Image (spheres, rainbow, N blue to C red):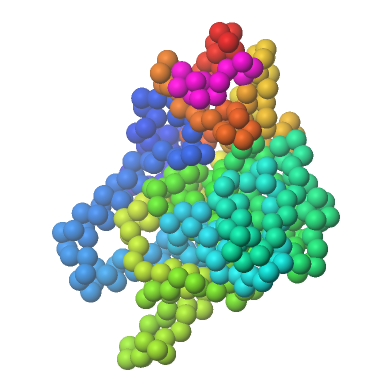
Amino acid sequence: MSSEPTTWQELRDTIPALRHQTYLNTGVSGPPPAFALEEELRWTRWLAETGPGRPDVMQAAFDELDRVRATLARFIGADADEVALTQSCSNGMAVVAAGLDWRPGDEVLVSEELEHMSGLLPWYDLERRRGVVVRTVPAREGAAKAEDFEGAITDRTKLICMSHVAYNTGARLPVEEVARLARERGVLLLVDGAQGPGNVPVDVHAMGAHFYAAAGQKWLLGPDGTGVLYVAKGALETVQATHLGWASFEHQPGTPVRELRLHEGARRFEVAGKHVPSLAALRRSTEALLSLGMTAVESRIRELAARFRAGLGRIPGVDVVTPADPDLWSGLVVFRIDGVDVEDAVARLWERRRIVIRWIPSPRALRASFHVFNTEDEVDALVEAVADLARAR
């Protein structure tokens, strides 16, 4: 493909996985476009054929990584020196958790009911090992309220961790409002953006969060093992780089190792070599979404989600978990079918109709993901399949 897609249909036409199934599971892993795969293969072949350790090849790889950082930074509204390349969203969150200066009695605020385990496990571990106190903020009808976070902040609160989009309800959470509160109260904010970039618009500068971790393999349609961590310039010195390697430091010819200095920006959180072919593929898929424009992408995602919700509303025995307020909607729609086991439903949808969705453990429910490349016919096919499951329960 010589140019970026300019319409959702052009993007869809490049995704091989959509030819033989109804794929509605981008919230787990997005189906990659062929041009991203071709970029990955091109780099893999070139590195193998030329010799990856040759000086000019190594420089080309470093230059590509700079392009990746610049593209991802542009997509989330950051400066290039504020982003580090990671292996996943979870990896980025773990970097922040490990790098803060924790003292016994320091508090972390989380909405336990809305967070993925990667947004909870680091704090529980710190609670056991370091005496950190994990305090929970209640969810309200599948979402969260900024005032509940405000009321939970104390003089011992060090960090708030919250998702941009709740993985288990599909609700957008009030990250901008919480960021404002956090800055007013001198509290750090880490946002789990696993379900954010590519699903909803992201501008980390406007948002005001101190840290934002995101995944490459979901809504950005990149390969597994890719991600990005944003660290605001003003928050850089609050986090130590706890895992260090040659990539963490600036290198000047002739400088003794003892005298090397950490990168001035977020690159200090990168440790060593990276899989350049995968990151080059992520750059291509991200550039495609930039070409479409997130305003257009978000608009279509919301239209598809609304169509699905309307269809579910006509089926007796179906309960939609995702909040009813359209301002909270994303590409994730979570629902239940009375009397139908969720694991069985996922299996039957695949076996009988070749429809791919997932089930959520808490609340125990089904979740469909709608990206810009999905069609109205695919939405209607899932509605029909849900109606069949409800009738047969």
- Residue 295 image point, x, y percent: 60, 44
Q: Residue, x 35% and y 53% (percent of image)?
A: 278
Report the quarter where the N terminus lies: top left
Q: Is residue 127 magenta?
A: no
Q: Is residue 136 left or right of residue 262?
A: right
Q: Is residue 85 left or right of residue 37?
A: right
- Residue 291 image point, x, y percent: 48, 48
Q: Is residue 342 magenta?
A: yes
Q: Which residues are magenta?
A: 337-348
- Residue 314 image point, x, y percent: 67, 14
Q: Residue, x 45% and y 62% (percent of image)?
A: 85
Q: Is residue 268 visible?
A: yes
Q: Residue, x 78% and y 53% (percent of image)?
A: 149
Residue farthest left in this picture: 49
The answer to whether residue 164 is above or below residue 303 is: below
Specify the quadrant of the image occupied by residue 324: top right
- Residue 286 image point, x, y percent: 46, 50
Specify the quadrant of the image occupied by residue 17: top left
